[in-house]
Amino acid sequence: MNKVTAAITGVHGWVPPYILDNKELETMVDTTDEWISTRTGIKERRILKGEGQGTSVMAAEAVKGLLEKTGVKPDEIDGVIVATSTPDMLFPSTANLVCDKIGIKNAYSFDMAAACSGFLYAIEVGANFIRSGGSKKVIVIGADKMSSVMDYTDRATCILFGDGAGAVLLEPNTEGYGLQDAILKSDGEGKDLLRVKGHGSIEPVTPEKLMKKDHFFYQEGKAVFRFAVTRMADAAAEIMERNNLKGDDIAYLVPHQANKRIIEATANRMGIGMDKVTMNIERYGNTTGATIPLCLWEWEKDFKKGDNLVMAAFGGGFTWGATYLTWAY
Ligand code: UT7
């Protein structure tokens, strides 16, 4: 029998309708469209508005579209994994809540936290459920409501992030398509440079703690940039080297969308032109766990069966990595 690989057989995304553009941010903090565009590449981002609207709302919309498109019924799903840093609540998991919204009743479901690298971690875990033979249909979601942890008086961070969700369906493949190799790394040296400290067991929320703003996203941008730009490119280059891939062999780099300059440096290191890079940072900003599946969704029409794709990410922790896959349809 042929070896079983795990392949993406469908992808869908969802972003909220409200657009927060750089012009509106100019009225909120001391910034300019010019500064944001040249330093990051971001022009606008989507924001999920409304009481009681959490990450699971966006994730469920992405899954609804995915099931419609692939013709798969909720009771056929074996597992749902959500990569998120902004779960609806500490527990139950956002994955549980998504299953409830969709009517998925026969599946295991859980969240994974690896910040901006979360989708790469989650898809590898999902793929292993398929490779083991234990699961036939696994949904892997990257979803974040970053607006829920933004301090909209802090110009250094609030201009960077947006909300969104993307979901892929993983199924077994016996023709060799799908996920081929992954490099996943982490190093706690970044713990003080990029974090949301105030929602966990170290800093239980009290009125005094709220005043310290520890429940907001915190980043030392310049320091993080230095790590991100080298480690994301290193991981992408390493996965190419160990799979004997040259720039010409790569159809697309699908990178995490934190900063246009980091993406360009990664493409450069891989020896590929920007025409082979999926980039929507201009329209969505950094949606953390959702950036890569949102790119897969928007570029799905351009991918061809057999295309070699490299997905690469870097995020809080630090966590980072690269995944090599061949497109299956
Ligand atoms: O996705 C997770 C991983 N995260 C990343 O990969 C993000 C990595 N870091 C970055 O992308 C960049 O560091 C940022 C986009 C966050 C910042 O860009 P930078 O070129 O590193 O700028 P900086 O933080 O060094 O700030 C330069 C100047 C400072 O002013 P002074 O000290 O030179 O007078 C800031 O106060 O720009 C100022 N500044 C702003 N000015 C206008 C910071 N934010 C803004 C702003 N508008 N929004």
Image (cartoon, rainbow, N blue to C red):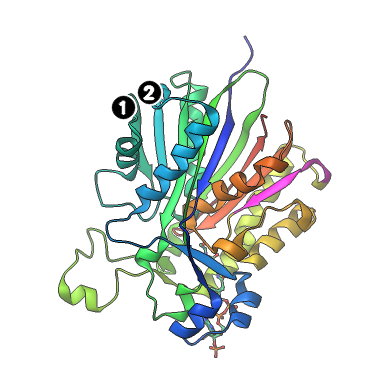
Residue 44 position, x and y percent, is: 55, 68
| Between discs 1 and 2, the one toward the N terminus | 2
Quick one: quadrant of the C terminus?
top right
Provide the residue designation for mark 1.
Answer: 105
Give the residue drawn at x 29%, y 68%.
215
Provide the residue designation for mark 2.
Answer: 75
- Locate ligand 1 by image quadrant: bottom right
- Identify the residue at the far right of this view: 248
Q: What's the amino acid at mark 1?
A: Lys
Residue 225 position, x and y percent, is: 57, 69
Residue 202 occupies quadrant? bottom left
Residue 67 position, x and y percent, is: 48, 32
Q: What's the amino acid at mark 2?
A: Asp
User: Marks 2 and 1: in contact by CB < 8 Å?
Assistant: yes
Describe the element under mark 1 as helix, strand or loop: loop
Give the residue drawn at x 54%, y 33%.
69
Q: How many marks?
A: 2
Residue 4: give its label.
Answer: none
> Dot 1: within a 10 Å radius of its alpha carbon, few (fewer than 14), some, or many (20 or more) residues?
some
* Visible residue check, residue 263: yes
Q: Is residue 291 above or below residue 21?
A: above
